[in-house]
Image (cartoon, rainbow, N blue to C red):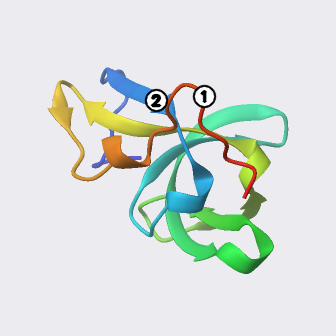
């Protein structure tokens, strides 16, 4: 995720409401059994999925909302604009 997130930088990740994701968000998603940070490059709300990519132009593919666990809200103490508003709050229902 260079330069958005460099190796060994501290990130803060919060549970996410996948229905609120937008292009440009950085998400924690499971791919092939491993959890990685990925850049959201497209959204498909009708099919409840997002396309995940790296920031070097490589598209990794589509993943369903149930495989997106969190959103990066800060990198090295610098907050990511708008990310906190997409975090799931206690008791919220993200099954829509």
Q: Is mark 2 on a helix, strand or loop?
A: strand
Is residue 53 visible in the rendered image? The answer is no
In the displayed structure image, the side of residue 24 where residue 32 appears, left or right: right
Q: Which residue lies furthest to the front in this view?
A: 91
User: Mark 1 highlights which residue?
Assistant: 91
Looking at the image, can residue 65 be seen? yes
Counting every numbered tag in the picture gives: 2
Above or below, 57 relative to 26: below
Horizontal relation, residue 12 to residue 47: left or right: left
Mark with earlier residue (2, 1): 2
Packing grade of label 1 (10 A; few <14, some 14-19, many >=20) is few
Dividing the picture into quarters, in which one does residue 5 lie? top left
Query: Dividing the image into 4 quarters, which one contains the C terminus?
Result: bottom right
From this view, report whether residue 85 is shown above or below residue 41: above
* Left or right: 89 as drawn, with respect to 47: left
Q: Residue 86 at x, y = what percent?
A: 43, 48
| Farthest left residue in view | 78
Q: Give the residue pinned by disc 2.
A: 14
Q: Position of residue 12 (x, y in %)?
A: 36, 25
Q: Residues within 10 Å of mark 2 (few under 14, many from 20)?
A: many
Nearer to me, 61 or 74? 74
- Near-viewer residue (8 or 25): 25
The location of residue 49, given as percent across then percent down, is 72, 65
Q: Residue at x 68, y 32 (%)?
A: 35
Taking depth in this image into account, of 2 and 72 the one nearest to the observer is: 72
Q: Identify the residue at horizontal 21%, vertical 51% (top origin).
A: 81
Under tag 1, what secondary structure? loop
Between marks 2 and 1, how big is the CA–CA gap?
A: 14 Å
Marks 2,1: beta carbons within 8 A: no
Mark sitting on residue 4: none
Residue 3 position, x and y percent, is 27, 49
Residue 74's image quarter? top left
């Amino acid at each position: 995720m260079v330069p958005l997130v460099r190796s060994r930088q501290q990130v803060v990740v919060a549970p996410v409401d996948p229905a609120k994701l937008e292009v440009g968000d950085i998400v924690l998603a499971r791919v092939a059994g491993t959890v990685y940070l990925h850049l959201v490059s497209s959204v498909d709300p009708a099919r409840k999925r997002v396309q995940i990519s790296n920031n070097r132009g490589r598209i990794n593919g589509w993943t369903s909302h149930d495989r997106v666990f969190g959103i990066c809200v800060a990198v090295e103490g610098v907050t990511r604009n708008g990310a906190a508003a997409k975090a799931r709050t206690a008791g919220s229902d993200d099954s829509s």
